[in-house]
Image (cartoon, coloured by chain):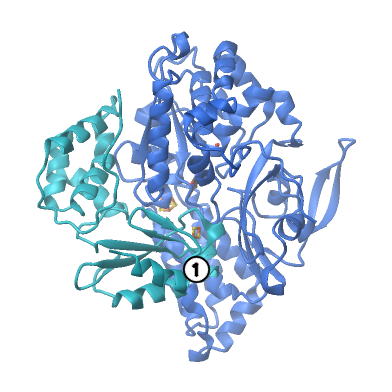
Amino acid sequence: MSTALEVGTENCAGPETGEITPALEKQATELIARYPVSARSAVMPLLHLWQETFGYIGPRGVEWIAKKLSLQEIQVLELVTFYPWFRQRPYGKFHFRVCRTLPCALGGAGKTFAALQKLMGLKPGAHEGAMVSADGRFSLEYSECLASCGTAPVVLCNDNFHEKVDEKKATELVGGCS
Amino acid sequence: MARREYRLVFKNIDVRGYTRDIACYQKHGGYEILKKGLAMGGAAIRDEVKKSQLRGRGGAGFPTGTKWSFIDPAKTTKPIYLICNADESEPGTFKDRQIIHKDPHQLVEGMILSCFANGVKLAYLYIRCEFTEGWKIMEKALDEARAAGFLGKNILKTGYDLEIYVHRGAGAYICGEETGLIESLEGKRAYPRIKPPYFPAVLGLYMCPTIVNNVETLCNVKHIVEMGGEAYAKIGRPNNTGTRLLCVSGDVVRPGYYEFPVGELTLGQLINDVCGGIRNGNRLKAVIPGGSSAKVLKAGEVYKIKEKGLDGKMSDKEVGLEDLRLDFDTLAAAGSMAGSGGVIVMDHTRDMVECLANISAFYAHESCGQCTPCREGVLWLKKILGRIAEGHGREDDPALLKEVADRIAGRTICAFGEAAAWPVQSFIAKFKAEFSARIARNGSASRHDTISLLH
Ligand SMILES: Cc1cc2nc3c(=O)[nH]c(=O)nc-3n(C[C@H](O)[C@H](O)[C@H](O)COP(=O)(O)O)c2cc1C
Ligand code: SF4
Ligand code: FES
């Protein structure tokens, strides 16, 4: 059985209201088939699938997944609130994650973060997690070690991974977002 | 003087012209060892792994052959599962990423061999979701292996069936802990399980016997099958066999990933010869030798270490920091650990209060919240360290930090408790004066470069 997946591209902007297409249903079915012993194991893959398709996981996603796997909605929602990668609101079109743990911090991650924040015109918000620009173009948050500490500081912009991101490179990255 | 690496697992990494597709892997002898292994039979592979004395590369250094021997495929009536731990999230560690990105088929071949050896028919590769590209690479590699007949039904006409699927994490460090990982793979919050049973080999995935091994460990299995357990055990040192992938980060001239026989290098040789010394002409101040959970070592320290001589007799030796061998036993004897192989180097300009505040912020963020000492204690550590770093420290804060850390370690469900307490205990014990001095010069003036280390 082929398990090729087309999705897997970060899509942080939403909206969650898009159509549930046959292609999406098919991908969900393929993912569930990977867990012949317990369909419940497919909750995380389906959460990823939903988030990548619709940008975030709202009540509609929780309901859809719970139904597919014959689970209580709380059994889906409790994962959304536990795992930091899942979000319940849209982020920016370009979502930046700056690694903040010790090796990256020693390499200047704090300066990189401050530079990005300034370039994107972001103010710390009331929410936990990411800061999102008013026009929805950019969002920014800290991340824990991204397993590339030898090329600190490192940044993940949507799916794209960037190494040795100093203030100059941060400016180029933001400039290249279109 | 530069030192020559011994590249076994990293043999093809960064080699010019080497690509990660199956054609290139097979051109370089890929999947030939699988054929050899399938012909040997599972019991023979298990025997070679035992003889190799391979110790797990994920953190605890537990002997792989022993772990596997908890399960007897001939006697088990339940299905046996294998999970490759590709969660790689210990700060300072970035070796598994290289294998996944640059030589994924080596991992697939190592996994198939390990599954075959243990009678496994369904296996999962648990990969952290931040490896967005690595995930797609592994999916493709598994598809290629399936198309070539190395996976699926009746592999290479031996009658052996195996399916391997990738499962992505979702940004939680605790998924690296093997029982947390299993809970996560079952579709739940990654709450580590209460021990005993101490090993998932007894009750693991879906309450069946399960083997969890690190990426590097499983790659080593391929090389053990290739060269034989005895030959493998000749690399490295007694009880510390094989090669080790070392990841160096922080204040060195050439940070990066290197492979050497276990224990061949001393810490000084790694930092000075391999990594070109401390950068900017600075001096060494402190090293965390095995990922951020390991206890810190301080420049100038001398350790009393029992070493087995060539005649087999034990003797006490005094060894300086830079002369410490980088192997499991020596680093444990020096009061720290080889852990995940992540060596974080700090130079003399670094503020130890800030470094520790950074580490504790990480653990406070990542506690799964199941046990009170960990959930509450780690947050306290972060808050107390935060206030010292920001210039509002109190005189008895160092003692308070130690007390809180002492009350976490040994009182929790999983080893995360120790991982969070050890840095605090060791930093406070070794750099106490620095903490006191920081508190003595409290006020706005003390916040000079915290911006890069806090949040
Ligand atoms: C808090 C915590 C985090 C861990 N993170 C990882 C990890 O990211 N990768 C890993 O391979 N092992 C990790 N481990 C170790 C695993 O629990 C387990 O021992 C290991 O995967 C076994 O593989 P090995 O025998 O091949 O070393 C972690 C352990 C703890 C307590
Ligand atoms: S020690 Fe911490 S991380 Fe481990 S189970 Fe307890 S609360 Fe969770
Ligand atoms: S600390 Fe940033 S990648 Fe490891």
- Residue A14 x %, y %: 17, 56
Q: Which shade of the palette goes to chain A?
A: cyan
Quarter placement of the N terminus of chain B: bottom right
Disc 1: host chain? B
The residue under label 1 is B358
- Residue A118 x %, y %: 35, 78
Picture layout, residue B250 above or below residue B450: above
Q: Which shade of the palette goes to chain B?
A: blue
Q: Residue at x 48, y 43 (%)?
A: B101
Packing grade of label 1 (10 A; few <14, some 14-19, many >=20) is: many
User: Is residue B16 or residue B267 the one in the foreground?
Assistant: B16
Picture layout, residue B264 above or below residue B407: above
Q: Residue at x 86, y 35 (%)?
A: B312
Q: Residue at x 82, y 45 (%)?
A: B307
Residue B149, by quadrant, is top left
Helix, strand or loop at label 1? It is: helix
Tally of numbered discs: 1
Does ligand 3 reach within 8 Å of label 1's beta carbon?
Answer: no
